[in-house]
Image: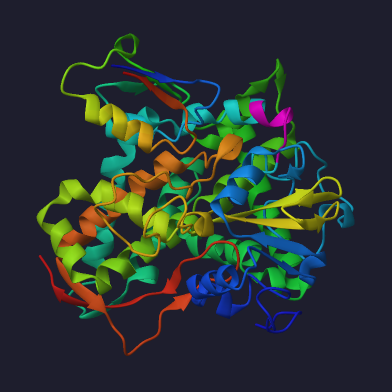
Amino acid sequence: MRVHVDPSKCQGHNRCYALAPELFDVDDYGNAFELNDGVVPAGLEDKARLALANCPEFAISIEE
Amino acid sequence: MTSVYGPATNWATDFDHADPEYNKNIHKIWDDLKTSGCPIAHTDRYGGAWLPLTYEMVHEISYDTTHFSSRSPVVGQLKPSEIPDAVPAPVGGVPPISSDPPFHAGARHLLLPIFAPKKIDPLNSVIREFCHKLIDDMGDKEFVDGAVEYAQNIPVMVVAHLLGFPLEDADQFRVWIRSALEDVGEAREQRETDQLALADYINKHIDQRIENPGDDLISYLLNAEMEGEKLSREHVFGTVALALIAGIDTTWSALGSSLLHLANNSVDRRRLVENPSMIAQAIEEFLRAYAPVTMARLVTEDMDFHGVQMKKEDWVLLPFPAANRDEKEFPNAATVDIDREINRHTAFGLGIHRCIGSNLARLELNVAIEVFLERFPDFEQDTKEEVKWSLGQVRGPRKLPLRIVTRT
């Protein structure tokens, strides 16, 4: 599984970073990006889905 | 205090968001409007305003900066075009919240680092200590006002800290903020006098920081550049005014509504007392269900919007709190469920104007609720006294009578 934050949609709500800090980080402007090229380590798939489902801007996508 | 418009006579055709009955009965008013087939209410008050109530419409307006300008995010009796010295679009009087593209992006970009999570997190201990002090100050009183003695003080302290304003001036800030946000339906003269006093206060501090720069937002703005140019005095002034006005009543309101919920829902309260790690998710649900902030837009050209004819310069209220209670986006929207895991709420707005202080607001809410529950594991609403709600676009309790049952 891979996650991706679309930087053109992210507005810095930081929901993904709060819910899944293993998968997302934020830059000095508070905008989110995926860690580890978006590769989701085994066992963290639910966290990835949770982050996607809580992004108010629909900026996160998942490749299964 | 009396509105120049008098009480609202019909919520569908003559609504008034600053009528005391509106914030008090807001959920019933929205439900009645929606079930009577009126998802967009209208009023001739304030020179004409619309109130769209669905998530879909709020979402659409938030992203459509072409047809909906942010030039004046608080509805007033006069449109900006009727105010001779109003700062024109795309800048507006309080950038970047009042700004439209293309100016908006640059003005926001220079503020984002100040409010980014890693910049904000170190304030945790300052806020925590302050919250404990507020509770210490209550002594062993059985009855306390959660809004006045607790919630309102926390964001004032944080904003004063950010701007380098003395905390002793807090009572004065609150008068000016109330005037700016709540007294929109009152006779204009008092509000104009208050705005001049606020302007004098801010200008005095800007002059002081020019002489003696410090480690505060005003000094940062005076040094900042946009496209290689220093900011205009007008821009610095507007952003300082924004930081003062936008960060206080909003957070105060969200915190007060959350405490009111916990006072009346002992099961939720006990679960959070026993499992403080659940507080963050519960706060997201409180932000959804009791979102405090409705923004406003101005229509830029005559248009049809979902079947209603909007005219250039009409106000459009952007009720994020109503969007958050739309059943189509949030199943069982009327139920406050602290176990709600999927929660794409819009309490901090959507699109380019996402509340820039949202990380700070969340930190304040989390710490303030953690400390309150730690010190007062059992409390309830004191129903002998009435909860008093704010007026206007920021909704929250301004009087929150609580009875403290147990304290530590």
Task: Tell me what residue is drawn at x 56 percent, y 45 percent.
Answer: B243
Give, as a single range, the part of the protein colored magenta: B99-105
Residue at 21% across, 79% down: B141
Q: Position of residue B317 (x, y in %)?
A: 66, 57
Residue B235 point in image, percent of width and height: 71, 36
User: Does the magenta portion include B58?
Assistant: no
Foreground pick, B208 / B294: B294
Residue B100 colored magenta?
Answer: yes
Q: How many marks?
A: 0
Residue B356 versus residue B406 in the image, above or below: above
Quarter of the figure with residue A3: top left
What residue is drawn where x is 39% and y is 33%? A14
Which of B43 and B86 lies nearest the eye of the viewer? B43
Image-quadrant location for residue B198: bottom right
- In the displayed structure, B126 sits above or below B200; it is above
Judge whether B347 appears above or below B139 on screen.
Answer: above
